[in-house]
Image (tube, rainbow, N blue to C red):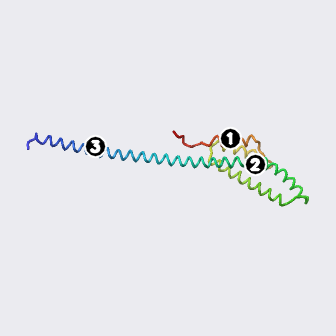
């Protein structure tokens, strides 16, 4: 074989090798891009599910909070009535069972209010935390949480409503 005969054969081999390398490279690139897209899609779905569960919890907490705060007037009325009964009971004229039932109901509502407030502080943002702090700051030895101003209670509910989407990813 002469040198001229080997050149076309060599060119064909080089072209075959380059073609094979391009095929393998294209296949690897396609696999990489597909895996990357699947991973990104999985991450988007996982984030969406997490955001959805957080939003579900926030809606439940908002409902619980509204329910408790809407019982304030009844609680205040009972507090005044039962306070009178307690005074009468000291003089032997009240019904002790009524007072015990009332105290138990107040203890349950107090527990629910403080539990929901703690959960609200975990699930919502700074406006809810601030509104919660304002309610607690307005309480004291003589003022219960249900006796704070209706403005403070409304600001608390407004903050909860306003921060439903706090920290959740915006969808396109």
Q: Residues within 10 Å of mark 2 (few under 14, many from 20)?
A: few
Is tag 2's residue or tag 3's residue first in the polypeptide sequence? Answer: 3
Give the left or right position of residue 138, taking residue 126 as reference: right
Which residue is under mark 1? Answer: 158
Give the left or right position of residue 136, taking residue 32 as reference: right
Farthest residue toward the left? 1
- Give the structural element (helix, strand or loop) at label 2: loop
How far apart marks 2 and 1 lie (CA) works out to: 17 Å
Counting from the top left corner in percent of width and height, residue 65 is at 69, 48
Q: Which residue corresponds to the image point at 86% horizontal and 59% vertical from the top-left?
A: 95
Q: Which residue corresponds to the image point at 60% horizontal and 48% vertical from the top-left?
A: 56
Tell which of 83 and 142 is nearer to you.
83
- The part of the image, by quadrant, that contains residue 153 is top right
- Give the structural element (helix, strand or loop) at label 3: helix
Q: Are marks 2 and 3 in contact (CB under 8 Å)?
A: no
How far apart marks 2 and 3 lie (CA) works out to: 73 Å
Q: Quadrant of the N terminus?
A: top left
Which residue is under mark 3? Answer: 22
- The part of the image, by quadrant, that contains residue 162 is top right
Counting from the top left corner in percent of width and height, residue 26 is at 32, 44
Counting from the top left corner in percent of width and height, residue 11 is at 18, 41
Q: Are marks 2 and 1 in contact (CB under 8 Å)?
A: no
How far apart marks 1 and 3 lie (CA) works out to: 61 Å
Q: Residues within 10 Å of mark 1 (few under 14, many from 20)?
A: some
Q: Which residue corresponds to the image point at 73% horizontal and 41% vertical from the top-left?
A: 152
Which residue is under mark 2? Answer: 71
Q: Residues within 10 Å of mark 3 (few under 14, many from 20)?
A: few
Is tag 1's residue or tag 3's residue first in the polypeptide sequence? Answer: 3
Judge depth for marks 2 and 1 and give the one in front: 2
């Amino acid at each position: 074989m002469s040198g001229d005969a080997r050149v076309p054969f060599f060119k064909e081999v080089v072209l075959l090798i380059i073609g094979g390398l391009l095929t393998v490279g294209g296949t690897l690139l396609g696999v990489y891009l597909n895996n990357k897209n699947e991973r990104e899609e999985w991450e988007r779905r996982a984030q969406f599910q997490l955001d959805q569960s957080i939003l579900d919890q926030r809606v439940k907490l908002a409902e619980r909070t509204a329910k408790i705060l809407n019982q304030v007037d009844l609680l205040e009325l009972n507090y005044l009535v039962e306070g009178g009964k307690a005074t009468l009971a000291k003089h032997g004229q009240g019904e002790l069972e009524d007072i015990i039932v009332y105290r138990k109901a107040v203890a349950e509502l107090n527990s629910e209010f403080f539990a929901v407030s703690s959960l609200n502080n975990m699930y919502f943002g700074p406006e809810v935390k601030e509104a919660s702090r304002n309610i607690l700051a307005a309480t004291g030895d003589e003022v219960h949480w249900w006796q704070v101003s209706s403005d403070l209670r409304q600001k608390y509910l407004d903050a909860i409503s306003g921060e439903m989407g706090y920290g959740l990813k915006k969808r396109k």
